[in-house]
Amino acid sequence: MITTTGSNWTDSSDQAQASVDDRLEPKADQAATPAESHTGSGTEAEIRRFLAEIFFLGDDPASLPSSKSLIEAGILDSTGILELIGFLEEGFGIRVEDNELIPENLDSIENIVRFLTRKRAS
């Protein structure tokens, strides 16, 4: 939808995309230093932050057990998996291959952290 504001034309789809992009950008007060940004609990914290911003994790996202199945809990569906993969590839600089799209890699926060650790080590 295109609207006018004074002499400016605005495409609301551009605004919607900008809103999505803004949610994925790290907040200044949440930014980690390069050395800690993708290590140990920093990785888990980034994954939890992404999941909480994009998907409903309940009233207390921190209470979600790391080993809980994100699919069985209704947090991720097939579209959510694609969003998660995009986040992992862009945010962590990895490439998720088709043969890696298995629950053992992506079905829980714990599995995602292990998968990222293996991918970055190779």
Image: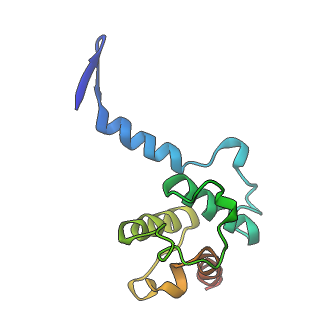
Asked whether, in this view, residue 98 is left or right of residue 57, the answer is: left
Give the residue displayed 23% in from the left and 28% down from the top: 2
What percent of the width, then of the height, locates residue 52? 57, 56
Q: How is the image coloured?
A: rainbow
Image spot of residue 58 (x, y percent):
58, 57
Residue at the front extreme, as displayed: 59
The quarter of the image holding the C terminus is: bottom right
Position of residue 64 measured from the top left corner of the image (x, y, whole percent) = 65, 67
- Does residue 21 lie above or below 74 as drawn? above
Give the left or right position of residue 104, taking residue 99 as reference.
Answer: right
Image quarter for residue 49? bottom right
On the image, the x and y values in percent for residue 117 come to: 65, 80
Image quadrant in which you'd find residue 37: bottom right
In the rendered picture of this protein, how many numbered marks are placed on residues? 0
Question: Considering only vertical position in the picture, is 3 above or below 59?
Answer: above
Toward the left, the furthest residue is 1
In the picture, measured across the screen, residue 36 lies left or right of residue 11, that is: right
Instruction: Name the quarter where the N terminus is drawn.
Output: top left
In this view, 19 is above or below 85: above
Residue at (66% x, 74% y) in the render: 66
Rendered residue at 43%/63% (across/down): 83
Residue 18 as seen in the image, left or right of residue 117: left
